[in-house]
Each structure stands twice: as structure tokens, then as C-alpha cells.
Image (cartoon, coloured by chain):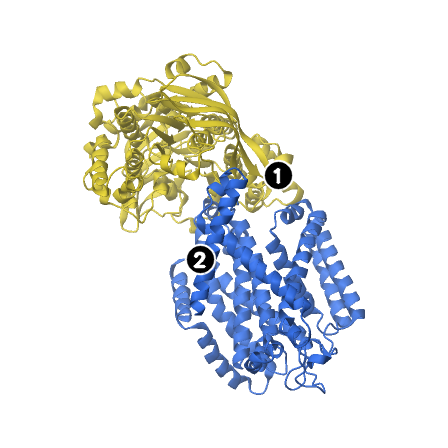
Chain colours: A blue, B yellow
Amino acid sequence: MTLLYIALAIVACVGLGWVFRLVGQQLTGNAPYFRDMGLGSAFGFALGAVVLLWVVVTYYRGMTAEGQDANKYFFFLVAVHGLVAFSVLAYFFRILGTQIGSEGSKKLFRNMPLTASFGIVIIMAYAFVSLFAGQISVTTIVIVGVIGLVLAEIVRAGGDDDAAKGIGVAFGVAIAIMVVMYFVGPLAPYGQEEVLAKANVVPGGNPAMGGDPEFPLGTDQIGRDILSRLIYGAQNTVGIAFATTVLSFLIGGSLGLLAATLGGWLDQVVSRAVDVLMAIPALIFALLLMTIASAWAGSEKWLLTVFMVIIIAVIDSTRVFRLSRAVGLNIVVMDYIEAAKLRGEGLAYLIFREILPNATAPLLAEFGLRFCFVFLTIASLSFLGVGIQPPLADWGTMVKDLAQFINFAAFAPQVAAAPLLAAGAIALLTVAVNFVVDWMLHKSSGLKE
Amino acid sequence: MSDLLVKIRDLKIEGRSDEVWNPIINGVDLDLHKGEVLGLIGESGAGKSTVGLASMGYTRDGVRISGGSVEFDGIDLLAASAAVKRGLLGKRIAYVAQSAAASFNPAHKLIDQHTEGPVQHGVMSKGDSEKDGMELYRKLRLPNPDSIGFRYPHQVSGGQLQRAMTAMAMACRPDLIIFDEPTTALDVTTQIEVLASIREIVEEYDTAAIYITHDLAVVAQMADRIKVLLKGDEVEEADTRTMLSDPKEDYTKSLWAVREFQRPAKPAVITGATPVVSVKNVTAAYGKVPVLHDVSFDIHEGRTVAVVGESGSGKSTTARCITGLLPPKQGVIEFDGTPMPLDYRKRTKEQLRQAQMIYQMADTALNPRKSIGEIIGRPVQFYGGLSGKAKRRRVDELLDQIELPGDQYHDRLPSELSGGQKQRIGIARALAAEPKFIICDEVTSALDQLVAEGILRLLARLQDELKLSYMFITHDLATVRSIADEVVVMKDGKVVEQGPKTEMFTPPHHPYTDLLLSSVPEMDPDWLDKLLAERGVDNIGDAAVGKMN
């Protein structure tokens, strides 16, 4: 029966597309755009229009619904509002970018698609939330300030005054934000481990529906505030994922470029070792190693987290190795590398000064993708119970903890949607990173639209 | 006129870069009659390919036709629907690209790609088209015409591939074929064969053609009429003979005059002088495949030795042996009478400094992520130990030597330079090491003739000023004639003939040298006819090389 409905809907959309194309042809006097439009494209337009219509109707019903009905639409409304808010932010962010900065950065922003701007805004929001989840300490501000000063001085000594000024401005802005946030206080209303008096508060903050305005997203089974844990989760999951990705790039990237440059037996040995590691399914391999690591770590929870970072970094570095070796091989055969070799340059100069600058674009794009995968691996491991350990908040663990609420979907949709909050946070970041990566790949491949 | 096939009026084309549309073609008119061959010539960037493609109603990505009209046999191609164009392209209009190797799909056999067009357009059945394809292969004098179609593109040589592509364009017997530099990437001996067969088949089927090239001598053989383009504008158009004998515009005259650059002969080398570089009995192999057999020659101070031969003859391998990238199996490489370590890794910095190299493709020879200042500054710093202001001064000096103003070019990236300027940067990088000896590996073959001439003049001037010795690898005998003092002719890894230039260009020659010399197209529209009449179609180009073995 359902299949029949789906088939009917598709046929209707095709018909609608055909009508749309015909009308377009009639109205525009058979302009090339409509004349050469395939039925597939017309179908796409029709389908898009139908989906948009459905969203608008549902949104209207959500806004006008009362009582028990209203809660059904709670997360739909949050999603629509969030999407619209971030899109508007992204739009203004792009405009801002075209107004300030150097000539190069202005041009970058002018050519930026809205999706990339959207992705950047979301990534910045995540970074902001994870940095300022807890109260920022004076020591941190001082340390960042000192690092900024030292960096700027080093660059200035290197003779690049403009770059030094840029670093100074960047660190100045960062410190200003930190000072403001020092007085604003932590973003999370409660601690991540804090067990509060009320458990199982329904999200939505509407007392009539079993919610509580003090816990806008509700609390979990043992009474921890879900909003606070989401915010701390950003800090833990994103921070650890970032560290892991950086580590995997240090290992895989340097080995890959080295193998590409030297070739010969080193390339063979490392490549075959990587093949062996890649032959084992990554998640199962990680699980296996984590089980061993948890025996080593014993009761030291932080040690287990360190082990996890190393294990995931090593497993993921195999993929980075493959890419950087492939990219490196294409660059190594260039005449300018031969010229540098004949000049008598050392290995370090060849790799870091001649090859790496040409490999940055694909490696940077891979960094974004790899970050998503690492992030998902950590979430999966946490979901399976061997990742980030409680009481530290983590999105994977949160999905696991709240997963049983899905059983209530039939009669309490707002409760059932609670695990989707953490899952949605994961999904949003993944989509955002991919938007940015797509844009970077598009730019580096030199494609024109 | 009724037999007007292509009629282009006031064609304007724009290309998008840096967010604005810049004009590429500013109003070009073009008429092509049935069965006529029109030659389009100009430097790179003149817009010849763009005009060629526009006559099919097509533009590349990021390019648009902003004005004018293109009519093919009365059909307005700019207003035609996609369906109408699909019916024309491949069937009545065909295209032959410059690089056949890059244009064939490596995953399919030649004949399968050949039959695709006729079958798609419903001209012939697959079986008929296969038979027809073999017939065309025979007409184009491909070896084994009945079986060659069942090979994959990588299994046939470049010249054969180019002819297979011409056959493919002919598959539907189109009214118009656009040849976009079909022989530019080929050796002279291969080129002559391709030219002869293209001309024959175009004449036989009375096909109209637009022949795009930057080689004047080639276009003189092929075209009935010639149109000269410069930066998107038409310079002049005339019959081939009129154009060659009596060019009107200064630009056209300058194109014609390019080949007149010739260096005066130098006095003979003093007997007993130690050569700067001496290659003695070098034998080399890639793995187990032998490439060089007992190659010996000397290069003296202030002299240019041109190493001539087809691709695969071992010219570049000799250079790799001298630089130490490919250590020879036997033989000695001497600089100033001192034997060098054969592997470049074992040479000292000072030894490496003495021999520098300039590459064919400036695009791959300059790191695209480094500024000109960094590229030239690195050898200055590396060998000379200069840094900061002293380095900058030296770089400016070098830029001055290659006739580029330092303050403008110091911070640019290679992508912001033209092909000729990039090649100059390659020269400056070699000069920065202050070498005695420079290997020039086909340095002008990727450049337009005017630009190439500038590079040759620059190299000659630098040689006089700095007493440099050059090893000049090339397959272009016109270049040899203009710059070389001595010539080494190579074939299949062996030195066939060597001696001073004057001797080499006066008979008697070794048969291979003779073949090379006779295959260089001349600016005489009857040259190809005369040659064919003299030798017969089976005694030119690769066929003749084959007989020699």
C-alpha cells in the first residue's frame, strides 16, 4: 500500500515537472533554458517544490498547534529555526568577509558559496561552544597571550612584518573574546557531571507538557541537564577528535610524503604494513585494541582516553598515508623536484619546501573529511561503551544513554526525540565540515561552474 | 553564394576570469566554402582554437559567445536547440584534437570508438562502419589496417593515433572537420606522414576543413586560404600563395621573418683544448632495456652542441647521464677533464653547481607555489650563501639579465607569467648557480615562434657575455640551424653523425640525417607536393625510417 503511494507520488511529480516545463516553454517563448531541459531536471524541480510545500505546511501547523499536539512539532520547529538562523548568519558572515580583511581574503569571500559560509559559521559556533563550555581561567588567557607575543616576535625577526601584524591582530581578537567570556561565565548552565534533583524532565521547557523552564532540553534518567551535557560534549568530542586527526596527519602525512620521495624499499615496507592494517575492518580493530588498552589503563580513565586517541590516530593514519603518498608521487615526478635534487637539496627541504606546499589543498580537504570520520568513530566507540568514559559528557554516550526513549515514539514523540539531540549535533557538524571541504576541493581542482 | 558552408559574422567571445568577463575574440568574420581548407594561425592566446570551436557552435567552460552569428549550411548554430546540434556534431561537423593520446578513451578499442559516431547518428550499422573504418585506415596508410582497429590507444604510436583520430572524424563523411594543431606534438618524420595523409583524405572526400596551427610551414602545405589572428582580432586573410609571397601587415611579416635568426659561425676550437664537458663511451639502460650505446661527444667553452633526433632516440637520456640522474652502465663523464661521480648523489655541491638544466615545460619546471624571487633566490642562497638584501640584489640582477624588471616580477607566482616569461625564469634559475655548462632540453618547443626566437636570442647573448657552454636538445632543425655550433644526430641510442653545423647542413649526409632534414616543412606551398613527387608516398617519414633499419 505504502509502495503504491510512493509510486503515485513519483508519477505525480513527473507529471508536474512536465507541466512545469511546458508552461515555462510557453511563457518564455521557448527560451533555450526550458527548451533543452530534460524531463529528469523538470522532475527535480517539481519534487523540490513539493518538499518545500510540505515543509511550509508542516511549519504552519507546528506554529498554530496547541497543547499535546504542539510537542509533536517541537524538534521540527527547532530544526527549521536553527537552519534559517544559521543560513541568515552565514549570509551576513559572507557579506562581512567581503567588507573587511585583505584584498585576497575579500576575493575569497566573494567567490564563496553560501553552503561553505554556512559550514564555516557552524564550525565556528561549535568551536566557540567547546572552548567556552566551562569557566575560562585567567591562566589560559595569560598563556594564549604569551604564545601570541612569542609567535609574533619570531615572525617579525624572520622579516615578515605584515604576517606579524596579522598574528598580533588575530591573538588580540581572541584575547578580547576570552576576557568577555571570563566575565560572562560558563556557557553551560550546570556542570557536566552534576546530578540534579529532577530526572526525566521532558524537553521543551513547557510545564504543561512535563517540561521545566530551568532545563530547556530536559534532563536524563539520573537527572543530568541535557543542554549542559550537549555543550560539554562539544568540548570533549570535538576536542578529542581534533587532536586525534592532527596526530593521524602527522603520522600518515609525513610517512606518505617520505615514501613518495624516497621510494624503493622504504616505500615497499611502509606501504605493505599499511595494507595489512587496512585489511582489518577499522571499527572492529579499534574495538579489539580498545579492549586491550582498557586492561592496561586499569582504573586510570584519562589514560584510556589517551590510548583511544593513539589507536584511532594510527588506524586513520593509514588512509592519510595512502592519500599523501599518491599526491606526493604526482608531485615528485615534476621537473622542479628534479631541479631541486640536482641542486643538491636535502630531504627535509624537498619534502617541506617543495612538495608539501603543492600537496596542501588535497591534504586540507582530506583533513576535513578525516575529522568527520574520526569524530564518528569516537562517537561509535563511546556508544559501544569503550570510548570516552563517564562521567565525561560525550555525544556518542548520550545517544546510547537516551536510546531507550525511542521506544516511546508512538505516544510521546517529544521524549523519543531526546537522543536525537546529540545525534543531530553530530550530524550537523559532519554536514558543515563537508560543505567546507567540498568548497575547498572545488577551489583546488580549479573547476569553473 | 550557395556553396558557403560556414558563415561567421562579427563573432565576439568572452572568457571569465577574476569575476569579470574579458573579451577573447573581438568581432571576427569567417567564410568557408565547401571543400575548402582554411588555415587559422596565430600565437597561443590569439583565440584560434576558440574560433575553431565556435564554428561548431561550441565554447569551452567559462567562455561564452557574446555577439555575432555562426551559420553552418544555413543553420544558425547559436540559436539551434541542443537536439539540432546533437544531430550535426559528429555527423556533419567533426573535430580532431591536438593530443590524440589524451582524446581517445584508453578503455576502448580504436574501432569501437570509431563506430560509435556512425551508429549513434544512424548513418551505418556497426558492421558496415567497421569495414568502412578499415578502409579509411588503409587510405590513411596505417600499418595493418585490418587489425590495427582492434588495438587499444596505448598500443599504437602517437602519429598512428593521430591518423586514427582523423579516420574517426571522417567516419560519417562530415562536411567540415576542424583540425586543432593535429601535428604539433609529433616528430618531424611522423608529422610529414600525418600531413600527407590528412591532405589526401580531405581532398578525396571534398571535405571542408579549418586547420588550426601555429606552424606557418605546416599551414602553407595544408590550406587554400590563411587567416592570421592576433589577440582576438583578425590581422589579415588571403590565399596561401599571396599570403606567403606578399604579406600586408607588419605582424604577419614578423611571423614570416622569425626563422631568419642565425648566429655567425665561430672560429674552430683550438685543438688540444680541454672540453668543458666530455661524454666518453657512455652506455646506459633503464633497468634491462638498453637506451644508449657508446655515446661520445665533447662540448667546448662558449660553444653550443645541438643534439638532434626523434623522440626515443636517447637525447634526453644522454642529458640524464650527464647530470647523474641516470648513472651510465659504462663510460665516463668529465667536467674540465676531471671525471665526475656517475650518480648525482655522490657529487659535491660544487660539482652539481657546474652543470645546470633548463626544461622543456616551464610549467612543471617551476614550483607553482613559490614566487619568482624564491625560485631564483634559492640557488643564489644555496650556492652563493647570500641572504637578505644581498640575495635580493643578486636576484634583481639575474632578472635584469633575462630582461624582466625585478621590482615587478619578484613577488609574482609562475601562474601569473606567460609561457615565454616562465621559460626566462627557468633560465635565470640556471644562471643563478653561475654554471659553466647548461643543458637546454627542448626549451623552445612548447613556445610560439616569436617567443621562441626571443629565448634563442637571449641564450645566444648570455653565451657571449658569460662564456657559457650549451648542450641543446631539440628535434627542431630550424632551431639547430639558428643556434648550434656543432651538431650530434642521434637515432636509437646511437650517435649517427656528428660535426660542425656547416658540415652537417651541406651534403653528403648520413641517410637518416638526410631524412630528418628533408622532413622539415618549408615555407613553400609546393614543398610537400614536390617531396611526394620526388620520393613517393611510401618513402617519407616513419615508413622510410622503418626501411632504414
Classify mark 2: helix, strand or loop: helix
Of marks 2 and 1, the one in the foreground: 2
For the residue labelled by badge 1, is the local secondary structure a helix, a strand or a loop? loop
Which percent across, then down, holds residue A209? 69, 79
Is A186 located above or below residue A335 in the figure?
Answer: below
The location of residue B6, given as percent across then percent down, is 40, 25
Can residue B433 be seen?
A: no
Chain ID, mark 2: A
Give the tally of numbered discs. 2
Disc 2 marks a residue whose amino acid type is Val
Residue B377: x and y in percent read 58, 43
Distance Cα–Cα, label 2 vs label 1: 63 Å
Q: Where is residue A385 in the image (x, y as percent from the top left)?
A: 54, 82
| Residue that badge 2 annotates | A11
Specify the amino acid type for callout 1.
Answer: His
Mark 1 crowdedness (10 Å alpha carbons): few <14, some 14-19, many ≥20: many
Chain where mark 1 sits: B
Residue that badge 1 annotates = B410
Disc 2 crowd rating (10 Å Cα; few below 14, some 14-19, many 20+) is: few
Q: Can residue A26 be seen in this view?
A: yes
- A44 or B130: which is nearer to us? A44
Q: In this view, does A200 lie above or below B176?
A: below
The C terminus of chain B lies in which quarter of the figure? top left
Using the rendered view, name the quadrant where residue A281 is placed. Answer: bottom left
Front residue of B463/A282: it is A282
Labelled pair 2, 1 in contact (Cβ < 8 Å): no
User: Horizontal placement of B414 versus B292: left or right?
Assistant: right
Q: In this view, does B129 lie above or below A318?
A: above
| Residue at x 50%, y 61% (from the top left corner) | A253
